[in-house]
Image (spheres, rainbow, N blue to C red):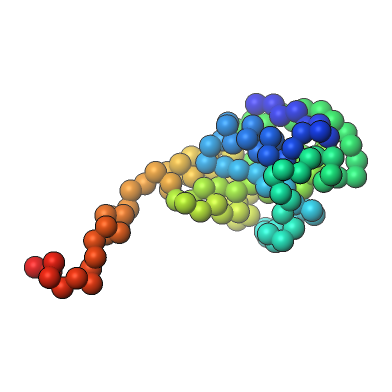
Amino acid sequence: MKIVVKDNKTLGEIQKEFNKEFPYLKIEFFETPHNNGSGSPKSRMYSNNRTVKSCRKTHDEGEISISKTETVSTLEQEFWDRFNLSVQVFRKSGNLWIETTLTNRWTLEQQNLEGREISEHKSPFDEADDLDLTDRDKWS
């Protein structure tokens, strides 16, 4: 897949394009790059309605080619090197999004498959949500 990065594009537009190809992954944009193996503080996350121009000092435009065999760390580094944009990949885990800092050497395909497996897996506890286990009259 290819994503065009231009100053007048919003971060949300880039996120949607990425998420269309990898539905169990998302990218978030931050003020500064994170250290390898550590996450980025949420307080430094950009809003998705910001334009690319407002998030960087250099204004090179172009395409970024993203392959499912590319690792998370490679993708994050490429956004920084080519477009001066700090991104972090997140993976869906049930109804949560988790940073992929501990698995950043996995490919995007591996991450996406793991997100799908975790998010679509039915837990035996899902049915328990509908039961009121405090109601003694229902106990047998």
Q: Indicate the quadrant containing the N terminus: top left, top right, bottom left or bottom right.
A: top right
Q: Total marks drawn?
A: 0
Q: Position of residue 49 (x, y in %)?
A: 72, 43
Seen as rendered, the residue at the extreme right is 58
Q: Position of residue 42 (x, y in %)?
A: 68, 59
Seen as rendered, the residue at the extreme left is 140
Residue at coordinates 89% horizontally, 37% vertically from top-left?
A: 59
123 vs 84, left or right, is left
Determine whether 4 is above or below 93 in the image.
above
Can residue 57 be spotted in the picture? yes
Q: Could you say which is closer to the camera, residue 22 or residue 103?
A: 22
Q: Could you say which is closer to the camera, residue 2 or residue 7?
A: 7
109 vs 62, left or right, is left
Q: Position of residue 94 (x, y in %)?
A: 45, 51
102 vs 49, left or right, is left
Determine whether 113 is above or below 101 in the image.
above
Residue at coordinates 24% horizontally, 65% vertically from top-left?
A: 132
Residue at coordinates 45% horizontally, 41% vertically from top-left?
A: 116
Q: Indicate the quadrant containing the C terminus: top left, top right, bottom left or bottom right.
A: bottom left
Q: Position of residue 41 (x, y in %)?
A: 70, 61
Can residue 80 be spotted in the picture? no
Residue at coordinates 77% horizontally, 48% vertically from top-left?
A: 86
Q: Could you say which is closer to the camera, residue 139 or residue 105?
A: 139
The picture quadrant where one finds residue 126 is bottom left
